[in-house]
Amino acid sequence: MTDNKKPSTPEELNLVNLDDEKPSTGKPLRSQQWYGKLDKDGFIHRSWMKNQGLPDHSFDGRPIIGICNSWSELTPCNAHLRELAEYVKRGVWEAGGVPLEFPVMSLGETQMKPTAMLFRNLMSMDVEESMRAYGIDGVVLLGGCDKTTPAQLMGACSVDLPTIIVSSGPMLNGKYRGQDIGSGTDVWKFSEAVRGGHMSLDEFMRAESGMSRSRGTCMTMGTASTMSCLVEALGMSLPENGTLPAVDARRQALSHLTGRRIVEMVKEDLKPSDILTKSAFENAIRANAAVGGSTNAVMHLLAIAGRVGVDLSLDDWDRIGAEIPCLVDLMPSGKYLMEDFHYAGGFPALIERMRHLFDMDTKSVTGVSLGESMQGAECFNDDVIRTLDNPLRDKAGIAVLRGNLSPLGAIIKPSAATPALLQHKGKAVVFENIEDYKARVDDPELDIDADSIMVLKGCGPKGYPGMPEVGNMALPSKLLEQGITDMVRISDARMSGTAFGTVVLHVAPESTIGGPLALVENGDEISLDVAGRSLHLHISDEEMQARKAKWQPEESEYHRGYAKLYIDHVLQADQGADLDFLVGKSGSVVKRESH
C-alpha cells in the first residue's frame, strides 16, 4: 500500500475468506486455514513467510504446494533432487500455485548401517507429520533411493492430500573394459569372482570407478528402479517417470510438468485414496513380474496398502503375479540396463504391449485412466522389451512359499534363480547370525557341498534389526573355486533388488521371535518346491515342539531410542514390516492453532 489508506477488506489485503475461493470441488483450500485468516494467527503465518520475499498475492487463495525433498549428499541416488525441485517449482508457479520446498529424512541405501530399511518407517513418520502440520494443499514427493519412495508414499497416504511423485531416475549405464556393467548386480558377480580366484583385486578396484558414473539410482532393475516403475503402474506419477535417466533433460521437463499437474490435482481434489485402489495394487504386482522387479517391492506395497486401507496380502502376490511373463531383458534377470529400457520405449511401451493383462481403467494422477495415459506408446527394441511370444521368463511373478518352515509365508524370485534348483532337497548348513556366517563361510573345514542348503537366522525385522539385504549370502570360497555359482539359500532377511540366485527370503515368522527357522539344526533336510509353493523342514511335529520348548530368545542390545521403538512395534514381513501403530491414516485435519 502506497497511499497510506488503511486496508479494510480482504480484497484490499489480497487475501480471501475461507469460503470465498474454492476449487472445483466446492471445498475451501486447506492452506487458507493458515494464510487466509484476518486475525492474529493469520498475521503470524503470513508475516513470517514473507521474510522469504513472498508478495501479498502469494496468499490470495492460490494452492500452496509442498515439495517434499529427500535430497542429501549422504544419499547419492538423491543428490541431484535440489535441482529437480527447481523445475517442479517452475511448473507450480506457471499453473498459479505457490511452491514451498521442505526437507525430510533421507535414506541412503548404500551408506546407512545397519540397514536403511530400519528407518523406512521413521522417514514415513517424518513425511506424514510434516505434511499434516504445514499449511499445504498438495505435495510433490521427490525421492528415488530404495526406501525413500515407499517411505514418502506411506507417509503421504496417511495424510491423503493430493500427491504426485517424481523419481530421481537411474544412472547412466556402467562401463568397464568396453562392456556395460550394472550397479549391484556386477558387484556381486565381481566379488564372487575375486573370492573364487577368477578376478584379481586390482581388476575389481578398477571396475569401481566405472560403475556409478552419473547421478541417479541403480541402473539395474533394483529396488529403486522397481519402485519408480511401480508408482507409474499405480498411477502415482506421470508417464515415463519410471525409466527416464537422471541426467536426461526430459526428466527436468517431467518435473516441470509434474509441478503444473499437482496444482490441477489440488483443484480437482484428486487424492491417493482415489487412485490407490485394490486394482491399482494388482496392476503394480503384474508390473513387478513384467519388469523382473525387486523382491523388496512385496513388503513396500503391503505397507503402502496398509496405510491407504486396501486389503493386500501375500496371497494376492501369488495369485496375481505368478502367471505374468517377464518381458524386460534387464539385469539382474537379464542383460540390459535402464538406459536401454527407456530408449526402447520405457514403461509405457511395456504396459501398452501387455494391456490385456492389466486393468487399464484405473485412475492416475494424469486425470485420465492408466490406459488413456499410456495410449499410443511404442516399443523401439524387441530385444530389450520382448514380445509376448518371446518372453525372458514365461512365468516371472514372485512365488510365495508356505510350509512348516514358513507358516506365514516366504518368497522367492524365480526369474533370478537357477531353474534346476527351484525343486531341491538338501541338508541344512546353519548360521545362527550374520557374525557366525562371516566367521565360518570361508572356513576350509566347513561341512558343505553344492547340494547343501545355506540357512541364515537372526536377520528379520526385529532380529537385526531392520531386516538387512544379506539373504543372498555369498557362497563359500571353496565352492566358488570349484565353479559352483548358485545354491539354495534360506533366511528371514531381504536381498538387494540387484541381486540374483536361488534365494528364499522374508521367512515369517522370523527366527528372533521363535519362528520355525530358529529351530533348524545342521544336517536337517529341507525341501524347496517352488512349483508346489512349499518350503518344508523334514522333522516330526513332535521334534519341532521339543526344540521349541528348549528355545530361548537372545536379549536385544537395543534398549532405547528409535531402534527400541521399532523392535517393540514392527510387524512381520508378511504384513509389510510397518510399525503396528502406523497402519491406516489420520487425515489432514489439524484442529488447534499454534499460538
Image (cartoon, grey):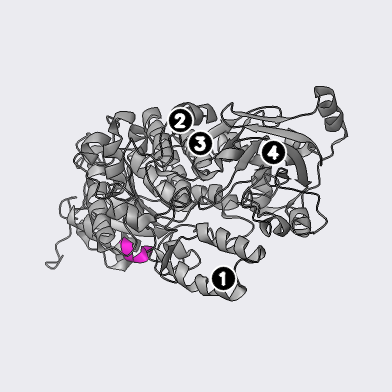
Q: Amino acid at mark 3?
A: Ile
Q: Is 498 positioned to the left or the right of 324 in the image?
A: right
Q: Amino acid at mark 2?
A: Gly
What span is colored magenta in the figure?
81-85
Q: Amino acid at mark 1?
A: Phe
Q: Which callout, 2 or 1, points to the residue nearer the camera? A: 1
Badge 1 marks a residue whose secondary structure is helix
- The residue to which callout 3 is attached is 398
Which mark identifies residue 204? 1
- The residue to which callout 2 is attached is 309
Answer whether residue 369 is visible to the viewer in this image: no
- The residue to which callout 4 is attached is 510
Quick one: 275 or 315, which is closer to the camera? 315
Q: Which is the main secondary structure of the residues drawn in magenta?
A: helix
Q: Residues within 10 Å of mark 4 (few under 14, many from 20)?
A: many
Residue 506 placement (x, y as % from top left): 62, 40
